[in-house]
Amino acid sequence: MKKTFKYLIIILIVPLLFITFINYKSTYEIRKENKEIKEVINKKNSTQILREKYNNNDIIGSISIEGVDINEAVLQYTDNDFYLTHDNYGNYDKYGSVYLDYRCTKESKKILIFGHNYYNSSTPFSKLENYYEESYYKENEYIKLTIEDEERTYQIFSVYIETKDFTYMNLKIDDDKYNEDLIKYKNNSLYETGVNVSKDDEILILQTCSNNRAYKKYKNKFLLIIAKRII
């Protein structure tokens, strides 16, 4: 009787184990397939996706600041004027696009990106004026930048409005002068960020017009968000 019972248990358990194994294998293969699909998607040229979306090969990457609700294509032309008045499709638009300085490459130690900010407008870079507040900075200090599908992360170390010294647009790097410039950028900040910089740092400068009333008497007044690369 005991042997019969054992055989019965074995007869019942073996099929269950087999079914469990088949289900596990099936689940594993589905997960593996999903992972492979995800990897394919991740490996797919994201810049190319944006180029296809806007039918524009001038798109060279993207920029995002999650808490600031900025997630934009970045364009580049042979000068710094065209995308001042053209959208992502290359059509005329007074609000322009977010674009990379024509002199910059992926290898540049200093990256300059421009975008419009009209009074009472909804242009992407109009949101950067929130950085006048230190509390806002503390919640949104990281910038994600992709250039030709190389993903980078930058940490903001300075926020200020420039009215007369536009040497920050100089892309020729001399180590001693570069270090002086970084210190100047940091000292000009509206508040202390606590982020240290050195001449070895790669930096990103976001430039847009400032609508801060305290600077309304100045003809040129640019809000600069300056960050160093950390990843």
Image: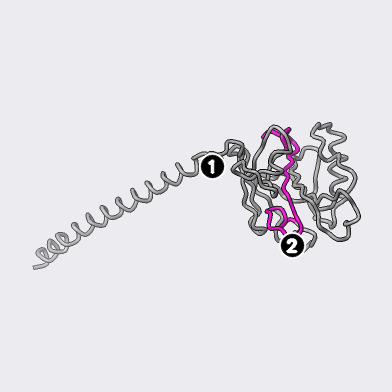
Q: Which residue is mark 2?
A: 136
Q: Is residue 1 above or below residue 43?
A: below
- Closer to us: 84 or 138: 84
**In the image, which disc is placed on residue 3?**
none
Q: How many labels, in total?
A: 2
Residue 31 position, x and y percent, is 38, 51
Residue 46 position, x and y percent, is 54, 42
Lower sequence index among marks 2 and 1: 1
Q: With 165 as the anchor, is 158 left or right in this view? A: left
Q: Say if the magenta span includes residue 216.
A: no
Amino acid marked by disc 1 = Ser
Q: With 99 as the anchor, is 37 left or right in this view? A: left
Magenta residues span: 101-128
Q: With 6 as the anchor, is 218 left or right in this view? A: right
Q: Examine the residues drawn in magenta and state their main secondary structure.
A: loop
Query: Which residue is drawn at the image coordinates 61% and 44% (left, top)?
Result: 88
- Closer to us: 99 or 133: 99
- Closer to us: 218 or 42: 218
